[in-house]
Amino acid sequence: MSKFFRSFVFVAVAFSFLLAACGTSAVPTATEAMPATQAPAATSAPASAATPTPLAPGSVTLTGTGSTFQFPAEQAYAEFFPGVDPAVVINYTGTGSGAGKKAIIDGTVDFAGSDAVLNPDEITAGKDLQIYPFLAGATVIAYNLPSLDPKNDPKLILDGKTLADIYMGKITKWNDPAIAALNPKIASKLPAQPIFTVHRADGSGTTEIFTNALTAFSSDWTAGHGTVIDWPTDKAGTGKGGNGNPGVTAEIAKNQYSLGYVEYAYAVQNNLPFAQMVNKAGNVVTASPDSTKAAMTDFANAFTPQLTAVIVDAPGANSWPIAGYTYIIIHQTSMTDCVKAQKLVEYIHWILTNPAAVKYATDLGFIPLPNAVQQKVLDTLGKVTCSGQPVHW
């Protein structure tokens, strides 16, 4: 096992340090989290004015679950939002997009996180559910090749067809001619070892993004797309699932000669090497905020009325080819606890518009919404009601 992977700290441990690290990083303090233009005026109200009684600190808990893709951002928000509104506690768990959608349909959480859109059956079951994109991110192909030095050797390069053939089980060894042709500088270091593929075992929006991309990349990809599929490499005994982005990351780390798809923020936070990709324009690109933003721009006018969009295999010269939005799902008209509804809408508005909240997510590798997309989301957020009355931020 390479020196890099002997020293790898698994995600489950790494995330226990994430919140501690936030406290010592150059992240705005709770006081800074609310811009001066939003801070309450330092003036006294007339004695006759009716002033609402402030809620006690921590008296409202907003519970969410779902996407592990957005989990790092939600954890940062949970730490800092009480500095904006001390009455609110954010409690978000990363259980996977499928579990998140089920929980919001069942009414066991206040909001769900998902990288996958609602299918027709879920829309029917959820009745008044509305999906809100709030960040985007890249999905990357992380790998464990002990023959490569991640500090000194060039990054592995893959293209869409080769990636699809690997997950179809058509390309089975690292020194396959198709991989070697894409990597002339490291071809001699590609071993004659079987490729072990890792994928999500749970219902996953990251899987939906990845399989949407494979479907777009290659007509030879016949396994379909969605949050859960039957993986051809599993049938061949050369594939394995992991629960959540942390589980996939851990499987890649402990299995030499493996590769798998994870959210960009997980790869960055854990120093996992990930492949460059040849995009639709024929250029070799690296996953980054800029290349993901380029893909978002390519599909800026592709939103459905439900505020969903697929942003894979983007045509731009600098666009990363495997990207997707991550969503918050809430009940749009059926909430009856109007204090909680108010706080939930204020929370969503904060993560969309507050400069500090945007910085938290950007520092973790997520991409904020372009202005045109953000305005569409805010317009829809303004239509939330509770017990028949509008809810405003």
Image: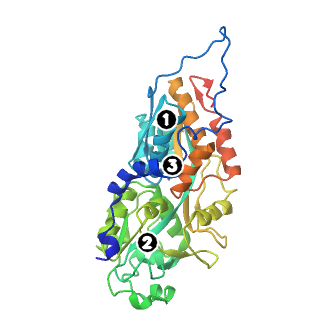
Cα gap from disc 3 to disc 1, whole angstroms: 34 Å
* Residue 369 % position (x, y): 63, 52
- Mark before the other along the chain sequence, 3 or 2: 3
Query: Disc 3 vs disc 1: which is toward the camera?
Result: 1
Location of the N terminus by quadrant is bottom left
Residue 339's mark? none
Residue shown at the point (38%, 56%) measured from the top left = 244
* Residue 267 % position (x, y): 44, 64
What kind of element bears circle 1?
A: helix
Q: Nearer the viewer, residue 256 or 279?
A: 256
Check disc 3 and report the residue beneath it.
119
- Residue furthest toward the bottom? 188
Residue 109, above or below 316: above
- Disc 2 residue crowd, few under 14, some 14–19, many 20+, Cα 10 Å: many
Residue shown at the point (49%, 38%) measured from the top left = 126
Check disc 2 and report the residue beneath it.
273
What kind of element bears circle 2?
A: loop
Check disc 1 and report the residue beneath it.
82
Residue shown at the point (61%, 43%) measured from the top left = 354
- Disc 1 residue crowd, few under 14, some 14–19, many 20+, Cα 10 Å: some
Q: Are marks 3 and 2 in contact (CB under 8 Å)?
A: no
* Residue 159 % position (x, y): 52, 78
Residue type pointed to by label 1: Pro
What kind of element bears circle 3?
A: loop
Residue type pointed to by label 2: Pro
